[in-house]
Image (tube, rainbow, N blue to C red):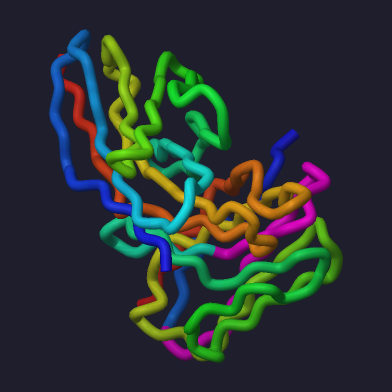
Amino acid sequence: DTAVSQTPKYLVTQMGNDKSIKCEQNLGHDTMYWYKQDSKKFLKIMFSYNNKELIINETVPNRFSPKSPDKAHLNLHINSLELGDSAVYFCASSQVRSGGGLYGYTFGSGTRLTVV
Amino acid sequence: AQSVTQPDIHITVSEGASLELRCNYSYGATPYLFWYVQSPGQGLQLLLKYFSGDTLVQGIKGFEAEFKRSQSSFNLRKPSVHWSDAAEYFCAVGERGSTLGRLYFGRGTQLTVWP
């Protein structure tokens, strides 16, 4: 059983389109994240949800909108796609320790988004 | 804000040679420390983590890392590299006491292994 699963794995779309990426975790973790990995492999956090509540919202264009229907799911919707949105998007989950901190992330396998 | 520096963008070693990947961090207290590995086209896999206690931690695939508070470092080592270790390696720092669960990642070190 895949712990953190993302769909689709690859996404090729034209500029201006709207697309969604879905993420599901079966680990029982309470916190989920979206990270963007650029062409130089740099990982930058975009959003984080804890028990369906948005807790991290980095400086991301408002064309990006996350949604967490329950603590096992975190989706990312992107409106009006631009060339610069091409990247690999990773979903991750973790369990925050009592007292703060965390046990570490479990990552999905990523969604490679190509905007043409 | 926390920062993580991986000074080596690319390292090449011969199979069977020893390996050390460097990681330095900037944080006011002792953070939680992690090393992740990313194989081509894959997600990131946790190699090992440090929370507290013994400063030498063992991980999967024969890797180990040593936390040195005085140097703000958490270097990853392996005594004998295998061709399958070729991948991108990321060091990450988590904030102790934070309920946000944010990880700060270094820019990664790409490891090439020569046969």
Q: Percent x, y for residue B80?
A: 27, 10
Q: Quadrant of residue A112?
A: bottom left
Q: Is residue A40 above or below residue B85?
A: below
Q: Is residue B79 magenta?
A: no
Residue at image x 52%, y 86%? A17
Residue at image x 81%, y 56%? A72
Q: Is residue A26 magenta?
A: yes
Q: In the drawing, does residue A69 fall left or right of residue A44?
A: right
Q: Percent x, y for residue A74?
A: 72, 65
Residue closest to the eye, B85 or A13: B85
Q: Percent x, y for residue B18?
A: 21, 15
Q: In the drawing, does residue A34 fall left or right of residue A72?
A: left
Position of the N terminus of chain B, as image quadrant, is bottom left
Q: In the drawing, does residue A106 fall left or right of residue B11?
A: right
Q: Is residue A73 above or below residue B81?
A: below
Q: Is residue A91 above or below residue B87?
A: below
What is the span of residues highlighted in magenta in the rendered image? A15-34
Q: Is residue B26 above or below residue B83?
A: below
Residue closest to the eye, B31 or A4: B31
Residue at image x 48%, y 19%? B58
Residue at image x 56%, y 33%? B52
Q: Percent x, y for residue A16?
A: 47, 90
- What is the tally of numbered marks visible in this picture? 0
